[in-house]
């Protein structure tokens, strides 16, 4: 039998032929693609021709195209529809891919060619984009240890390989804890729960093979359960299981893994000549240093903490009024906050949820992209990796722009959270390659024949991930190295967080927030009440985020902590963390930081980007139209289509004309008065 992963794909849009791919195809395909990539890299390094941009930088860019294609298919499956075979493959691939990457950057002949080009960069007649690619390639090789020799070079390879193994293990342990735990609900346990929560619990029970409704650790189910269940004992049981992911002892405990990861990251940074991992990681970000990160976070922390403590006092009074002694606990906060929102804003989740149908919110995201950028979305029937997935052909003026895939429902085989990835990135070097972009979410799946209902936060998540998708789909560069979301980590969240603002546009809600049963649009007074409550409970949301970001930063400054849990506790105590609020991501399930080093020492990035996204949407408000064509064209030109073709700060300055201050963020979160 031929291996479909190694064939030339004739599928629509060049999709992987998921209907023909078997798990056992991946290992030989990856091995063959690695052999091919190694041979191509060796040919570049050994070329008898003098180094030039085309025969070195461009040739290197093209060397691993088949490997990218195979891995694009594999990781789409492994992240969103895992099984034992795919988890084993991930464990197998991690050290292989790390070894290959180390071989490339430690090839002295290859780096000599790159370095000679970089030394002569002003005399090569390069375009601005080519110059940027050369600069980034040279920098990436240096930061990967290209100048190291002997024992130091060998040790760096070992460290990076071990880190790749540990990151995979951390992710799989977390998935196992999330997959294995659920809490059955008897009939009496359903008291006080809205119908949408009960239906989601029943659907989750069917997925788990349970005889009745269950609560799982999926955020889209456990959060509304914590909001609405009057059973304090059940809320506590569910909450404690949720926050204990990764620290339950046994084979899936992540605490020792986190400690080893931090130690190896410190060693990696010091081998490369940096004082610590934070200095290494932040060198290439907009923030530039840990001091600037801490300054931003602390300017937000103090007003957020004051607001949270004030809110906690009110919620604790409500707890006491219900006859409970003792302090407000973390499993109480969402329940009493929801009750308070109902009292103060005449608003509750059960009233809102029927207006946020998944299909209508997808339509809303598409419609905004059409008005802003002229994109059209047509559903297509193509082979995908799971029956829950859907696909759309994205066009503009009749020309194909991208294939967009939506995978929206939670399942036991999918890791938690929401993300955007590209099975194939946009580039022009190998022809006009258009992207295949995937949005993955974990919304509660409804019973057959019922509409999938989202919370308002779920709908924001959908818009957020679609903002990332637009960054990929509208990319217009030549080189994959700078395509789409290949930008500074603290800039990558700008397009996603900015796009969330269009969900709040009243005319968008009036058109697309329609009732699941009556079809009627959301009444204007309900829209006003919902938007009026947009800053409600932001002290809580901001504290749980900023605490996580500050712990992440502390982990990577100076010497790595021998006991990360103790270091976490010390940081939170020094901050005066309110006792009824926990970190959004405690260390043993902090996948952003420990499943790879993408957000390590960089979880702050969401807030750094939020400073810009509040200011960027203000550009549309200043134009008097949330769909102002001229502002939208600038956004596409300088942000969405530019990828990493220039430094992030330059791109933002070209779009907006200035850099924003933190005041827009505080105002957007309702915390400006608390400052």
Image: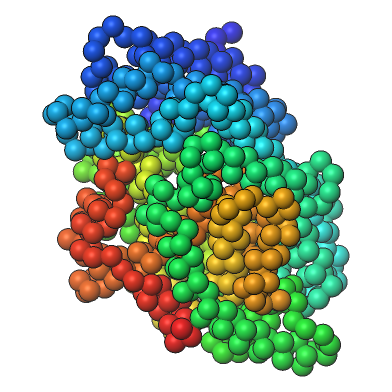
Residue at 55 percent across and 28 percent down: it is 152
Can residue 155 be seen at all in this image of the molecule?
A: yes
- Is 6 situated above or below 223? above
Residue 513, quarter of the rendered image: bottom left
Which one is in front, 581 or 416? 581
Residue 332, quarter of the rendered image: bottom right
Q: In which quarter of the image is the N terminus?
A: top right
**Image coloring type:** rainbow
Which one is in front, 87 or 209? 87
- Is 375 situated above or below 504? above
Horizontal placement of 63 versus 176: left or right? left
Residue at 49 percent across and 65 percent down: it is 294
Horizontal placement of 446 versus 504: left or right? right
Residue 126 position, x and y percent, is: 17, 30
Residue 381, quarter of the rendered image: top left
Residue 9 position, x and y percent, is: 43, 20
Marker count (numbered): 0
Residue 674 position, x and y percent, is: 48, 85
Can residue 204 be seen at all in this image of the molecule?
A: no
Horizontal placement of 335 versus 442: left or right? right
Residue at 66 percent across and 89 percent down: it is 314
Residue 432 position, x and y percent, is: 27, 29
Which one is in front, 254 or 159? 159
Residue at 42 percent across and 63 percent down: it is 292
């Amino acid at each position: 039998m031929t291996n479909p992963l190694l064939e030339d794909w004739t599928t629509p849009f060049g999709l992987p032929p998921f209907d023909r791919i078997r798990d056992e195809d991946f290992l030989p395909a990856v091995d063959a693609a690695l052999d091919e990539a190694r041979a191509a890299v060796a040919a570049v390094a050994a070329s008898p021709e003098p180094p030039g941009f085309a025969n070195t930088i461009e040739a290197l860019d093209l060397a691993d195209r088949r490997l990218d294609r195979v891995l694009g298919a594999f990781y789409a499956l492994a992240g969103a529809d895992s099984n034992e075979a795919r988890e084993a493959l991930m464990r197998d691939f991690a050290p292989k891919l790390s070894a290959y990457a180390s071989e490339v950057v430690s090839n002295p002949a290859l780096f000599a060619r790159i370095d000679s080009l970089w030394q002569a960069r002003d005399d090569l007649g390069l375009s601005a984009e080519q110059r940027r690619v050369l600069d980034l390639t040279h920098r990436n090789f240096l930061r990967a240890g290209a100048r190291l020799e002997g024992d130091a070079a060998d040790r760096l390879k070992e460290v990076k390989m071990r880190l790749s193994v540990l990151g995979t293990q951390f992710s799989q342990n977390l998935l196992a804890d999330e997959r294995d735990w659920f809490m059955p609900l008897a009939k009496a346990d359903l008291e006080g729960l809205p119908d949408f929560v009960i239906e989601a619990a029943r659907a989750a029970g069917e997925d788990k093979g349970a005889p009745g409704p269950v609560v799982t650790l999926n955020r889209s189910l456990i959060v509304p359960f914590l909001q609405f269940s009057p059973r304090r004992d059940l809320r506590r049981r569910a909450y404690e299981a949720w926050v204990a992911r990764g620290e339950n002892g046994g084979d899936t405990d992540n605490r020792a893994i986190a400690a080893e990861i931090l130690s190896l990251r410190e060693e990696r940074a010091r081998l490369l000549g940096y004082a610590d991992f934070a200095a290494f990681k932040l060198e290439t970000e907009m923030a530039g240093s840990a001091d600037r990160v801490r300054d931003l976070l602390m300017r937000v922390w103090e007003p957020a903490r004051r607001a949270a403590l004030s809110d906690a006092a009110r919620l604790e009074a409500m707890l006491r009024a219900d006859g409970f002694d003792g302090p407000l606990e973390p499993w109480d906060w969402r329940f009493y906050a929801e009750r308070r929102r109902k009292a103060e804003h005449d608003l509750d989740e059960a009233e809102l949820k029927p207006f946020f149908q998944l299909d209508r919110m997808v339509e809303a995201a598409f419609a905004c992209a059409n008005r802003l950028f002229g994109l059209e979305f047509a559903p297509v029937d193509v082979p995908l990796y799971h029956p829950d997935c859907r696909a759309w052909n994205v066009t503009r003026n009749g020309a194909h722009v991208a294939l967009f895939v939506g995978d929206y429902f939670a399942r036991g085989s999918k890791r938690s959270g929401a993300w955007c990835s590209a099975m194939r990135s946009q580039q022009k070097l190998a022809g006009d390659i258009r992207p295949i972009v995937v949005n993955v979410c974990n919304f509660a799946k409804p019973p057959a024949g019922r509409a999938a209902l989202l919370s308002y936060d779920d709908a924001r998540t959908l818009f957020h991930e679609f903002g990332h998708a637009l960054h990929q789909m509208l990319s217009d560069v030549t080189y994959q190295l700078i395509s789409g979301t290949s930008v500074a980590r603290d800039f990558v969240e700008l397009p996603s967080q900015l796009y969330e603002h269009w969900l709040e546009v009243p005319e968008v809600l009036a058109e697309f927030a329609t009732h699941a049963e009556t079809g009627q649009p959301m009444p204007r007074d309900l829209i006003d009440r919902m938007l009026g409550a947009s800053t409600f409970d932001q002290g809580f949301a901001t504290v749980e985020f900023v605490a996580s970001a500050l712990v992440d930063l502390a982990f990577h400054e100076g010497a790595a902590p021998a006991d990360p849990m103790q270091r976490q506790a010390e940081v939170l105590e020094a901050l005066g963390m309110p006792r009824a609020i926990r970190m959004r991501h405690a260390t043993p399930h902090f996948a952003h930081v420990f499943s790879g080093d993408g957000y390590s020492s960089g979880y702050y990035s969401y807030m750094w980007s939020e400073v810009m996204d509040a200011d960027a949407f203000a550009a549309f408000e200043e134009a008097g139209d949330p769909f102002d064509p001229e502002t939208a064209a600038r956004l596409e030109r300088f942000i969405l289509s530019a990828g990493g073709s220039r430094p992030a700060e330059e791109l933002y300055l070209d779009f907006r004309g200035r850099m924003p201050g933190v005041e827009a963020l505080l105002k957007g979160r309702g915390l400006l008065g608390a400052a």
